[in-house]
Image (cartoon, helix red, strand yellow):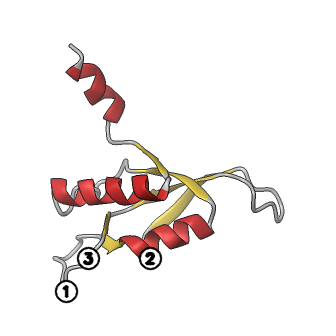
């Protein structure tokens, strides 16, 4: 899984610390049998299990692969993270909400 811990409050062996990570790609409940070259996706159930095991509390979606499979892949990623209680940020959610209020 293309995953990078980008912020860590950990010191020593303190596993209660909070981590923020970046995932390059989308989380899918059902992986296609084949993906195009440089299209990044990972099984949602497996990815969420690893994120929880690593104490990740939020994911940055600010990357160039979050739209690799189009709006449906992004929606699946958001749904998987929301269902797992993992926060997310980085795709202009706040800005879109502000524009919708105009």
Q: Is residue 67 above or below residue 28?
A: above
Picture layout, residue 71 above or below residue 43: above
Q: Quick one: label 2, few (<14), some, or many (20+) residues within 10 Å? A: few
Q: Quadrant location of the N terminus?
A: bottom left
Circle number at residue 33: 1
Quadrant location of the C terminus?
top left
Where is residue 12 shown, x and y percent of the image? 83, 62
Which mark lies nearer to you, 1 or 2? 2
The residue under label 2 is 46
**34 horizontally vs 49: left or right:** left
Q: Which mark is residue 14?
A: none
Name of the residue lying farthest toward the front: 83
**Frontmost residue, 48 versus 61:** 48
> Residue at the location (32% across, 35% down)?
92
Asked if marks 1 and 2 touch (Cβ < 8 Å), the reply is no
Q: Is residue 1 visible?
A: no
Q: Residue at x 19, y 76 (%)?
A: 37
Front residue of 57 and 6: 57
Mark nearer the viewer, 3 or 1? 3
Picture coordinates of residue 100, whole percent (x, y): 21, 22
Residue that carries the numbered disc 3 in the rendered image:
30
Farthest right residue in view = 12
Give the quarter of the image for residue 23.
bottom left
**Regarding mark 2 in the picture, which secondary structure is present there?**
helix
**Rendered location of residue 10, percent (x, y):** 75, 56
Disc with the residue nearer the chain's start (2 vs 3)? 3
Q: Tell me if I can see residue 73 in this picture.
A: yes
Q: Residues within 10 Å of mark 3 (few under 14, many from 20)?
A: few
Q: Residue 8: where, in percent of width, then height?
A: 67, 53
């Amino acid at each position: 899984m293309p995953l990078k811990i980008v912020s860590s409050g950990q010191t020593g062996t303190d596993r209660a610390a909070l981590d923020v990570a970046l995932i390059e790609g989308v989380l899918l409940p059902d992986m296609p049998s084949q993906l195009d070259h440089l299209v990044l996706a990972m099984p949602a159930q497996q990815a969420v299990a690893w994120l929880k095991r690593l104490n990740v509390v939020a994911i940055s979606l600010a990357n160039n692969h979050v739209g690799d499979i189009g709006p449906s892949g992004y929606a699946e990623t958001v749904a998987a993270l929301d269902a797992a209680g993992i926060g997310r940020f980085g795709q202009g959610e706040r800005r879109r909400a502000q524009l919708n209020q105009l």
